Image (cartoon, rainbow, N blue to C red):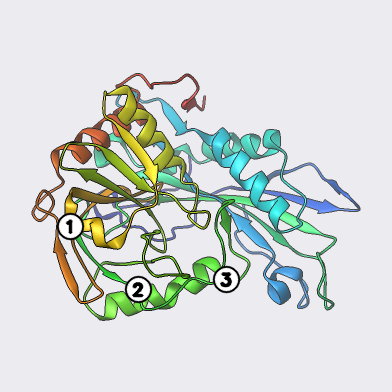
Amino acid sequence: MANVNVDWSKLGFAYQPITQRYVANYKDGKWGKGGLSDDPNVTMNECAGILQYCQEVFEGLKAYKTEEGRTVTFRPDQNAKRMYDSAQRLEMPPVPEEMFLEAVDAVVKANKDWIPPYETGGALYLRPYLFATGPVIGVKPSDEYQFRLFGTPVGNYFKNGIKPITICVSDFDRAAPRGTGHIKAGLNYAMSLHAYITAHNRGYDENMFLDPATRTYVEETGGANFIFVTKDNTIVTPKSSSILPSITRRSLMTIAESLGYKTEHRPVKFDELDEFQEAGLCGTAAVICPVGRIEGKGRTINLPSGMNEMGPVLTKLYKTLRGIQQCKIEAPEAGWVHEVK
C-alpha cells in the first residue's frame, strides 16, 4: 500500500507526484527495456535536444475507478497511435504501441491507491511523453530519447466544474499545426499560453483561436476542441488541419450517432455561432464543459441553452460518455474501455 495522503474532496487539476512512473530509453538506434522508477526527476545534458530544439511529444489520458471497484482506462490504444504519428512528424523514434500500453498498465497497477474513489468523480491523469536527451547543437534530430509516463490524481479541469464558462476570441495566432497530436516543439502549447493568460487577465475562462489565414473560422482553444449543437439538435465540430484530433471529440461524435443525432464535422464560421443553441469544450481533461458566452470581433454571443447550466443535448452526451467510462453503459464499439487488473 502506498502512503497516500490526499483530500479527495478538494482535488483540482494540479500536479501531485505519485509513487511510480515508467521510464524507457532509446540509444544506438533501438529502444531499451522500460520499467518502473520511484524517481520523479529527470537528469540530462545541458545540450539535450529537448532543451535546444524542443523535440518533444506528449499525450494525456485517464484511469478511473468504477462503482464496482474495477480500474479502467479509456481508449489507450488511440493515444498510442496518435503519439506514434506525432513522433514521426518530429523525426523522433516512435514509441511502439506495445510499450506504450505496457507503460499505461504498469503505472496504473503500481499506483492504484492514487486513483480517486469512484464517488469523487476524479481520475488518475496519465501523461506519457517522449523527448530528446542526446546533445545536439546543429539543427538536426537527436540520437537519444527518453519515454516516460507518470500520473497524478485530478478533479475538474475548470475551477467551476461543468458550469458554463465565458470565452474571448484570441488576439494572437498559434504558430504551429497540431494535426498529428500533442506536438510541443516549443510552439503549440507554449504559443497558446500567452493567449490563455491574456484571456484570464481580461476575466474570461478560456480563449478561442480562429484560423490564422482569414480569422474567419473557429478552430479550438489552447487545451480543448469545440463542440456545437444547432437548433435542430445536429452536433457540429469544427474541421481544420491545424486542430488537434481529439479522441474525446471523435468518441462523442460516434456516441452522438449511436444515439440517433445527426453529426457534422465541417468548417465553422465565427459569424454563425449565434445560430447554435449549445456550445461546449471537449477533451480528456475537460470531458465536456459548457460555454455560456463568447466575445470577440465586436460581438457578444450568448448561448441560450448554456447560460446557467449545460444544455440538454450536451448533457446527454456527457452522461453517456461518463457512463461508458464508468462501465455503466455499453460503448458503441468494442474495445473502448480497457480494464487494468
Vertical arrangement, residue 70 with respect to residue 230, above or below: above
Vertical arrangement, residue 307 with respect to residue 35, above or below: below
Q: Nearer the viewer, mark 2 or mark 3?
A: 2
> Mark 1 Cα within 10 Å, few/some/many (few <14, many 20+)?
some
Q: Which quadrant holds residue 141?
A: bottom right
Q: Earlier in the sequence, mark 1 or mark 2?
A: 2
Q: Which residue is mark 3?
A: 187
Q: Which residue is mark 1?
A: 274
Amino acid type of the residue that numbered disc 1 sits on in the rendered structure: Asp
Vertical arrangement, residue 145 with respect to residue 107, above or below: below
In this rendering, position of residue 62 left or right of residue 226: right
Q: Which residue is mark 2?
A: 170
Q: Which quadrant holds residue 229?
A: top left
Seen from this angle, which residue lies furthest right?
28
Q: Which quadrant holds residue 130?
A: bottom right
> Mark 2 Cα within 10 Å, few/some/many (few <14, many 20+)?
many
| Residue 44 in view | no
> Residue at position x 55%, y 50% from top?
59
Q: Is the C-beta separation of discs 1 and 2 under 8 Å?
A: no
